[in-house]
Amino acid sequence: MLKPIESILFATDLTANCQQALDFTNAMATRFQATIYLLHVIEQLPEGVDGRLKNLLGRHKWEDLVTAQEANVHRSLTGKTSVNKMVRTDIQNFCKLVGIDDATFDFKSREILIAQGDVAENIISHAKENNCDLIVLGAKSGLFSKTSVGSIIKSVLKNSKIPVTIVPKTDS
């Protein structure tokens, strides 16, 4: 028997490929009254490139660029409204779309996580850190094509100790 879903890790690369996965995550969170941990990982450049850019720009300028990138990602994930307000609005719109009465659902919250490094490792480690019961990832169109399930998804599927759901992008 599967344990109840109390928290979901949704990893996003901030592309349109993830919209259906976000919709699915919101539906699951609504259904199970679960907390969503929204994770975006900023991939590190290969060590040689990283070092050369630091030397070229200077350590402080490089750190400023990395900090600015993290801030841009956070703004992309949260927009100008508070996270809980944004999520509640998104969920209310979803519930109206599928015919669920607002009074019948409850939603805990969504936490924004921004990390840097190996994407698959960060997905696994953040899911473990936050005691997540499910990982949701978005795939490109055509779930079974050669490019839709890349190395990151394969690595997460191979190394995860909890269920992983892959939501394909559908052409609509």
Image (cartoon, grey):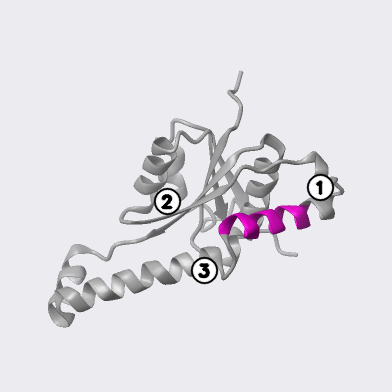
Residue at the outermost bottom position = 56
Q: Which residue is mark 3?
A: 76
At horizontal 23% and vertical 71% (from top left) the residue drawn is 63
Q: Which amino acid, by three-letter code, is at mark 1?
A: Asp
Q: In whole angstroms, how far apart are the C-alphas of marks 2 and 1?
A: 36 Å
Magenta residues, dominant SS class: helix
Q: How many marks?
A: 3
In the rendered image, the quadrant that contains the N terminus is: top right
Q: Which amino acid, by three-letter code, is at mark 2?
A: Ile
Dot label at residue 152: 2
Q: Which residues are magenta?
A: 83-94
Task: From the top left corner, tell me how far across and down residue 123 is, in percent.
Answer: 42, 46
SS class, disc 2: helix
Closest to the observer: 106 or 59?
106
Q: Is residue 102 left or right of residue 107?
A: right
Q: In whole angstroms, how far apart are the C-alphas of marks 3 and 1?
A: 27 Å
Earlier sequence position, callout 2 versus callout 1: 1
Q: Residues within 10 Å of mark 1 (few under 14, many from 20)?
A: few
Q: Is residue 27 left or right of residue 131?
A: right
Task: From the top left corner, tell me how far across and down residue 103 is, in percent.
Answer: 82, 43
Asked if the residue under mark 1 is in contact with the one under mark 3, i.e. CB atoms within 8 Å, the reply is no
At horizontal 51% and vertical 58% (from top left) the residue drawn is 147
Q: In whole angstroms, how far apart are the C-alphas of marks 3 and 2?
A: 22 Å
Work out whether residue 25 can be spotted: yes
